[in-house]
Amino acid sequence: MYTPTEVRELTPVREAVEKQATLDLRDVFLCHAWDDRQGAAKQLHDLLEARGVKVWFSEKDVGLGVPLLRAIDRGLANSRIGIVLVTPALLRRLPKEGIADKELSVLLAGARLVPVVHQTTYEALRDVSPMLASRTGLDTAEESMAEVAAKLAELVAL
């Protein structure tokens, strides 16, 4: 049995442990263009999940009636790394400063961010986001989407 002083001292620790247990922690946050949500982004999501990677993906993680930006904010906060699926659609959307641009701004501030270039080039990315293009990443022109997913799964297993 704990003394009243010990209970007071342990309460913040217990509350922190309980809070952490209620968080929906994810291995990766998948940033993508809206136009890719049922194509390349869904494909990458499915391949990662098939490898046991917990992915925050707006298509499944934002419920009806939920404030989108707040859900994205929680997803970003509770994900270990960010993956940015760089497609022609994303390159068109980033200059318009929409949701993907906001996600990218947050992800660029972190240390663990991996661009995945798909159906475009690093040169095209560099024209839109030199900071994202400066990160080492993966390119589906060099490896299949399945191989890219396997490498990302290895990364989060570290």
Image: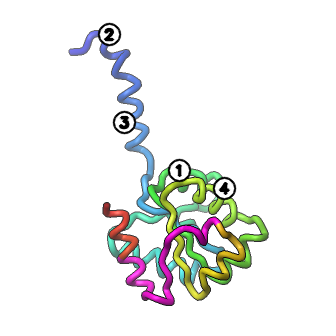
Distance from the alpha carbon under mark 3 to that under mark 2: 20 Å
The CA span between labels 3 and 1 is 17 Å
Q: Amino acid at mark 1?
A: Ala
Contact, CB < 8 Å: mark 4 with mark 1?
A: no
Residue 51 in percent (x, y) is at 33, 73
State which region is magenta.
Answer: 131-150
Residue 158 in the figure: left or right of residue 24: left
Residue 77 is tagged as 1
Judging by the rendered image, the residue that carries numbered circle 3 is: 17
Identify the residue at horizontal 41%, vertical 30% (top origin): 15
**Counting residues from the N terminus, which is met first, the one under dot 4 or under dot 1?**
4
Q: Secondary structure at mark 2?
A: helix
Percent coordinates x, y for residue 22 in the rendering: 42, 44
Amino acid at dot 4:
Leu
Q: Secondary structure at mark 4?
A: helix
Q: Secondary structure at mark 1?
A: helix
Give whichever of discs 3 and 1 has the lower sequence position.
Answer: 3
Q: Badge 2 is on which residue?
A: 4
Relative side of 28 to 84, left or right? left
The crowding category of the residue bearing disc 2, from other C-alpha atoms within 10 Å (few below 14, some 14 to 19, many at least 20), is few
Where does label 4 land, which residue? Answer: 69
What residue is rendered at 44% in x and 56% in y?
80
Q: Where's the N terminus, which quadrant?
A: top left
For image coordinates 35% across by 77% down, the residue present is 150
Crowd class of label 4 (few under 14; some 14 to 19; many from 20; radius 10 Å):
few
Q: Quadrant of residue 132 in the image?
A: bottom right
